[in-house]
């Protein structure tokens, strides 16, 4: 999988599955700025738990949302299921 393809897939997961605002009308690229952080974690071999906690930290501290760690865990597993990319 190319880096761009992985970027797009993670962005889609953040938009369609994570979406901490809960707004179905949120812009498609609303969470684009968080993709590089998640990609870096995936590339470095981070666990699903680390990715989940990172997503939860983003939604609770950066976005000011209450968030759900359990929901973030489900999203993290979807991200972990994506194929690796080749640089």
Image (cartoon, rainbow, N blue to C red):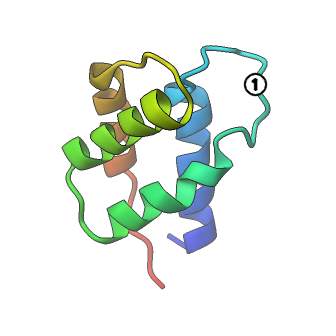
Residue 81 visible within the image: no
**SS for callout 1:** loop
- Please give the name of the residue rendered at 34% of the width and 61% of the height, measured from the top-left corner: 42
Classify residue 61 by image quadrant.
top left
Q: Position of residue 48 (x, y in %)?
A: 24, 45
Residue closer to the observer: 10 or 40:
40
Q: Is residue 34 left or right of residue 66?
A: right
Q: Position of residue 67 (x, y in %)?
A: 42, 19
Callout 1: 10 Å neighbours few (<14), some, many (20+)?
few
Quickly name the residue at label 1: 26
- Please give the name of the residue rendered at 48% of the width and 30% of the height, measured from the top-left corner: 59
Q: Position of residue 81 (x, y in %)?
A: 33, 48
Q: Position of residue 77 (x, y in %)?
A: 30, 39
- Please give the name of the residue rendered at 46% of the width and 39% of the height, measured from the top-left corner: 58
- In the picture as drawn, the residue positioned furthest to the bottom comes out as 87
Q: Is residue 57 left or right of residue 12?
A: left
Asked if residue 56 is positioned above or below residue 65 in the image, the reply reads below
Q: Is residue 30 left or right of residue 60?
A: right
- Please give the name of the residue rendered at 58% of the width and 59% of the height, measured from the top-left corner: 7
Residue closer to the observer: 84 or 48:
48
Classify residue 76 by image quadrant.
top left
């Amino acid at each position: 999988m190319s880096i761009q393809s992985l970027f797009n897939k993670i962005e889609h997961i953040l938009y369609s599955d994570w979406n901490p605002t809960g707004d179905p009308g949120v812009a498609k690229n609303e969470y684009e700025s968080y993709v590089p952080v998640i990609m870096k974690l995936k590339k470095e071999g981070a666990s699903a738990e680390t990715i989940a906690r990172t997503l939860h930290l983003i939604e609770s501290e950066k976005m000011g949302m209450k968030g759900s760690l359990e929901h973030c865990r489900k999203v993290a597993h979807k991200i972990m299921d994506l194929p690796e990319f080749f640089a």
